Image: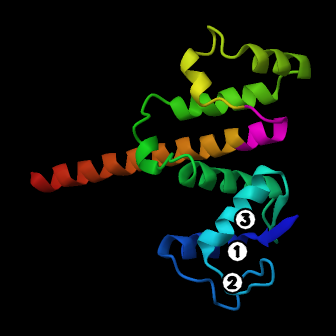
Amino acid sequence: MVEICARRLAALHYADRFKKPIDDPHVTMNVDGNWNIFASDVRATLETAYASGGLRLTVDRWPQALVDVSYERDRQVHREGWTPEHDDQHTGFELARAAARYAQHAGYKDKVRRDIEKRGPTALHAAHEAAWFRPKDRRRDLVRAGALILAEIERLDRAELRKAEASREAAGDE
């Protein structure tokens, strides 16, 4: 089991962006006895552990579920390529519907879940869903739903910010 606190994970993401070693004593990580490692190397270890269910992120005040949703959102951006720019193209609330789909699937009884997973998408759930809908267990489905909700809220916030900036610019032109 790989364990890491959220503050150090935040440092990991910061270091990864700038390809800097993590060498501050307050944020260094000990992975296999190496205290001065590149974040990109740690990211691969964390992703492998997370995918296998062998990763628990620990925090002082945040619930584990919140940490897991945050990590899943980061995975979606860095591994799936669902960046904010990509998300901004989905103006028809597709992210909210995808989140609802995962949450809905998590709420089904086991037999219904198995039937859906066997037969694939139905008329109720568009065929394009087959490209992205990959249900796991209930908790993982809810974590994915939470990350997609977060992505949709962030998209709405960016759209509102752009709208406000456009209004200010238009007012400045008058």
What stretch of residues is rendered in magenta? 135-143
Above/below status of 95 relative to 104: below
The residue carrying mark 2 is 27
The residue carrying mark 1 is 7
The residue carrying mark 3 is 45
Of the residues shown, which amino acid type is indicated by label 3? Thr
From the top left corner, tell me how far across and down residue 52 is, in percent. Answer: 81, 51
From the top left corner, tell me how far across and down residue 147 is, in percent. Answer: 64, 46
Circle 1 SS class: helix
Q: Residues within 10 Å of mark 2 (few under 14, many from 20)?
A: some
Query: Does 46 appear in magenta?
Result: no
**Mark identifier at residue 136:** none
Q: Quadrant of residue 12?
A: bottom right
Disc on the earlier residue, 1 or 2? 1
Circle 2 SS class: loop
Disc on the earlier residue, 3 or 1? 1
**Mark-to-mark CA distance, 1 and 2:** 7 Å
Above/below status of 20 relative to 148: below
User: Is the C-beta separation of discs 1 and 2 under 8 Å?
Assistant: yes
Asked if residue 127 shows in the view, the reply is: yes
Closest to the camera, between mark 3 and mark 2, is: 3
Asked if residue 67 shows in the view, the reply is: no
